[in-house]
Amino acid sequence: MAVVSPITRDLAIDGWGLAGAGVLGVIAASVVVHGGAGRTIIPFIIVAFVFGLAQVVVSGGWLRNAVDSAPPAPADLLMEPDGTTLRRAGLPTLLALVLVVIALFVWVQFAALLAGLAFAAGMTDLRSRQWVAAFERSNAVVILRETSWLPFATARKPLWSRPAGDRP
C-alpha cells in the first residue's frame, strides 16, 4: 500500500521554497560580497537562466510523458497528511538554505551560484505545477505521486491518475 500526495501540492511547496531560498541567497550574498552586488547578481542570473533552461528541457519532457501515461490509481493508496507533505517537500528548501549559508562563509560568489541553482529549480517546479494543474483541469483528474523522504528520489516514483472528485 503506497502513500501518495497530489503532485501539484509537492511542486508548489518545493517550487516556492526553492525559489525563495534562491532569492534570499542572492540577497545575502550581495550584502556580504566586497566589490559590488554585481559580483553576485550576474553569476546568479547566468546560472539561473542556464540551469533553468536545462531543467525545463529535461524534467519538462519527463514529467509530461509520465503525466500523460499515468495509469489509474489502485484503490489501496493512502493520502499523505498535509503537514507531512509540507515537511517532506520542504526538505530540498532546507538543504538549499544550509548549502547557501555555508557557502556564504566559504566563498560568497559560490553562494550566489547555489542560489541561482535553487531559484532555477524552484521556478521549474512552479512551471511544472502550472502545466500539471492545467492537465488535471482539462482531463478532470488528479495526478498522484508516491512519496519519498529522499529529496531527489521523487522523480523515480510512480504517478497515478484518479478522477478529480475521488480521494484515496
Image: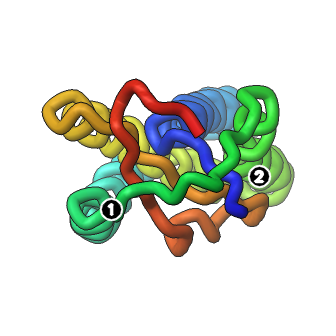
In the rendered view of the protein, which quadrant contains the N terminus?
Answer: bottom right
Query: What residue does disc 1 label?
Result: 70
Mark earlier in primary sequence (2, 1):
1
Q: Quadrant of residue 103?
A: bottom right
61 above or below 90?
below
- Mark 2 to mark 1 CA distance (whole Å): 30 Å
Viewer can see residue 104: no
Tell which of 55 and 65 is nearer to you: 65
Tell which of 158 and 150 is nearer to you: 158
Q: Amino acid at mark 1?
A: Ala
Q: Residue 119 appears at what percent x and percent y?
A: 48, 42
Mark 2 closeness class: few <14, some 14–19, many ≥20 residues within 10 Å: some
Q: Which residue is located at x 30 percent, y 51 percent? A: 49
Report whether 31 appears left or right of 87: left
> Number of marks in the image?
2
Q: Which element is circle 1 on?
A: loop
Q: Residue 166 appears at what percent x and percent y?
A: 46, 31
Query: What residue does disc 2 label?
Result: 95
Residue most toward the left? Answer: 138
Q: Quadrant of residue 113?
A: bottom right
Task: Specify how the rendered protein is coloured.
Answer: rainbow
Report whether 114 appears left or right of 107: left
Front tag of 2 and 1:
1
Q: Residue 80 appears at what percent x and percent y?
A: 72, 40
Q: Which residue is located at x 29 percent, y 57 percent? A: 67
Q: Amino acid at mark 2?
A: Leu
Do the residues bearing badges 2 and 1 touch, measured as CB atoms within 8 Å?
no
Mark 1 closeness class: few <14, some 14–19, many ≥20 residues within 10 Å: some
